[in-house]
Amino acid sequence: MPKRIFPAEWGFLFGLMLLLTGCAVGTSTLPSVSRSTSNSVAVVAGTEVASTKSSSLWLQSQGQRRVKDANPPAIRAVSAIMIDARTGETLYQKNADEPRQVASTQKLVTALIVAEQDPLDEPVRVDRRDTNVEPTKVGIRAGELYTRRQLLRAMLVHSANDCAAALARTHSGSIAEFSGEMNRLAQRCGTTCSHFVNPHGLPAQQHSTARDMARIAFRAYHNPDLREAMAMRSYCFRYASGRLCMLEPTNKLLERSPFFNGMKTGYTEAAGKCLVSSYSRGGRELILVQLGSHARYVFDDAQRLIGWAAGS
């Protein structure tokens, strides 16, 4: 007689078949780990940040993968993103695609246009229209001559709105024409939700996102002239009259550690406190964008979050 197979043996065989089938399915359909509003999950999305480096081409072919498991410290910014400054990897994000005004951090777009397209050591003449801006300015006067490099450094170190206006007008002829160039350059950086209407970030119908600002910051970080200017712990501005003025940086992270190496601050009532910061130490290079934060917390939050990502 053939051997009888008892129900328990059927259960064992059926369970073994399910186990083998489940392993095969599980290895081919891993769920995505991307959560755009999460504080605790980081992803790599190679297409998120425009890069000219070959490493970014590798990232684009890899899709998404988790790069950080530990929970990051909480920050007060409404939206934020941190990327690897060498590859463009996203290491952290919080509401990174929420459109917001970004205040003076959009001066990075102005700086990129000037640094990439204009002769920096060529003198330009200040117009009266350039001086009609508030509140932060160095007090250049109509008719005075300055090199673009002088104006660029004053804009990036001290957030001078009059210098931003002069750079924009002498590049394009008018603020309106320059804003069109800003939007075209932003698109070349890979932005998808940005619209700029002035070179300094004063309140207007304009917006960007933390992710888009990271794309812009990535390009600025890899420009040698901008890297040099953004890293200055102070800048001695020489007026046309010969008078000297020591400009202190608005980015207070530069005073905390030599490993913080620049980028841009911003503030308006509509935008809140904004900060784009960069860090380099031991081969680790990071860019952090915070939008809609508070002056009391933004630098401490940046230091703690960058320290978390850097493993320090």
Image (cartoon, rainbow, N blue to C red):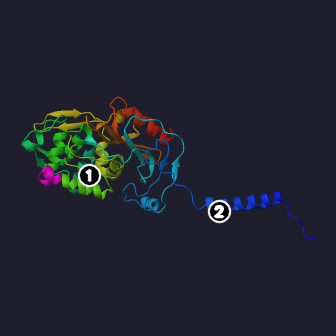
Question: Circle 2 — which element?
Answer: helix
Image height of 268 relative to 178, above or below: above
Q: Answer with left or right where residue 74 lies relative to residue 217.
A: right
Based on the picture, tell me whether residue 171 belongs to the magenta stretch: yes
Q: CA distance from mark 1 to mark 2?
A: 50 Å
Q: Answer with left or right where residue 116 lies relative to residue 285.
A: left
Residue 217 position within the rendered picture, expressed as x and y whole percent measured from the top left = 33, 49
Q: Amino acid at mark 2?
A: Ala
> Which of the two residues, 85 or 295, is positioned nearer the viewer here?
295
Q: Quadrant of residue 23?
A: bottom right
Residues shaded magenta: 170-178
Residue 117 position within the rendered picture, expressed as x and y whole percent measured from the top left = 22, 57
Q: Which mark is residue 112?
A: 1
> Which of the two residues, 35 or 268, is positioned nearer the viewer here?
35
Question: Circle 1 — which element?
Answer: helix
Give the crowd class for mark 1: few <14, some 14-19, many >=20 residues within 10 Å: many
Magenta stretch, main secondary structure class: helix
Q: Which mark is residue 24?
A: 2
> Which of the two residues, 240 or 280, is positioned nearer the viewer here?
280
